Image: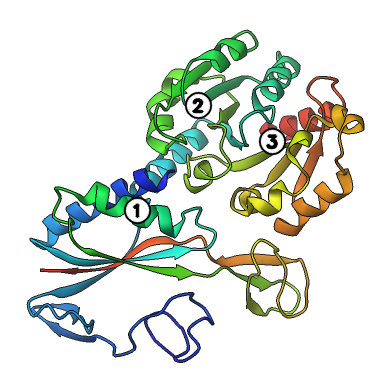
Amino acid sequence: MCLDCGCEEGNEKKYFEHKHDHAHPHVHTHDGHTHSHAASEEQHPNSRVINLELSVLAKNNAIADKNRDWLKSKGIVTVNIISSPGSGKTTLLEKTLEKLEGKINCSVIVGDQSTDNDAQRLMKKCKHVYQIETNSSCHINAEQVGNVLEEVTDDTTQLLFIENVGNLICPAAFDLGEDFKVAVLSTTEGEDKPVKYPVVFSDARIVVLTKVDLIPYLDWELKKCRQAIQQVNPGVYTFELSSKSGEGMQDWIEYLGKLVN
Amino acid sequence: MHELSLADTMIREIEQILDREKAEKVYSVTVLMGRLSGVEKEPFEFAFPIVSEGTRVEGSKLIIERVSAAVKCDECQAETELDVPYAKCGSCNSRKVKFIRGREFIIKSLEIE
């Protein structure tokens, strides 16, 4: 077995979908450090290989950990809400904030590529709302969240919602310092979306299925959708609700209440 | 297309490492990319030469090693490769599994001078 990566020689697909040269580089120690020389086809006589095992997102992850520590020290529970555009995140938050008013002190960070339209809507329901405009970027990063935490919260804040940019791919890669991710999916998107975008759905602690009031009008089967969710994330808790009609909202609100108490 | 910003982030990390190592040139960058990392190989390969232009990383070879996803079964304890996106044990078909590999997005090594 190759000690670099665990692949079996001649059976390289066992663990890795790669092809590499099995004429291994050699490793030796001098000047108090270990390094290896490349055994690649292109020889660079004066080159050295340094092994790093460093996460590309190390900096983002370090800031995310700092955010998480700060939020924990303040006793704030944080959820990162991710979905495709138009699945109903903002409407869900509007209705959620309405129902939590006077019971749980909430703050919201909302990300969009452009405009503060969502923040304007949410500010009618909550005093503490901050809009991040990401411009050319398709996700919010930990630094952007860290920069606004003090402004968007106060000493009474119990629950922080981060409404991520509408996108099922990119936000999944960025830890923001949340306690957990919530994946939102609407009935108008097709039952198999979780299977098509498994990265975000497999990493979510909670899935919220929205717009269930539309089911009678759609060629859409709840059973198939539940199956697709469970296929990528077995056992994940799913709330099935309609922000508009209020159906199923009570369970969601009770769940949020338990998070902070 | 977050691969562009990820490639940019990676180049900045590498520049810092080059400073630390007092290196002038990079011959190759080896990256481990998990099947569930949320990063795709082709757009990342597209972005790499663009964002490395004008840096000490310019002209280096990008080697991407894909890491398949794997799960450990809570019931039979087997560690099996995952048939993405279906989260189940490849040995006994149980759905009580934990992800043990596949979310990596790591700079594995640099060949420098």
Closer to the N terminus: mark 2 or mark 3? 2
What residue lies at 48% left-to-right and 63% top-to-bottom? B34
* Same chain, labels 2 and 1: no
| Distance CA(mark 2)–CA(mark 1) | 27 Å
Quarter of the C terminus of chain B within the rendering: bottom left
What residue lies at 40% left-to-right and 26% top-to-bottom? A135
**Is label 2 in a helix, a strand or a loop?**
strand
The one nearer the camera, A135 or A237, is: A135
Left or right of A43? Residue A229 is right
Left or right of A77? Residue A38 is left
Type of amino acid at the residue the image marks with label 3: Leu
Q: Which mark is residue A201?
A: none
* Same chain, labels 1 and 3: no
- The subunit carrying tag 1 is B
Type of amino acid at the residue the image marks with label 2: Gly
| Distance CA(mark 1)–CA(mark 3) | 43 Å
The colour scheme used here is: rainbow
**Quarter residue A48 falls in:** bottom left
**Is label 1 in a helix, a strand or a loop?**
helix
What residue lies at 29% left-to-right and 90% top-to-bottom? A23
Where residue A24 appears, as percent x and y from the top left, is 29, 88
Residue at image mark 1: B46
Above or below, B68 against A236 in this view is below
Q: Which mark is residue A111?
A: 2
Residue at image mark 3: A259
- The subunit carrying tag 2 is A
Above or below, B67 against B53 in this view is below
**Is label 3 in a helix, a strand or a loop?**
helix
| Distance CA(mark 2)–CA(mark 3) | 23 Å
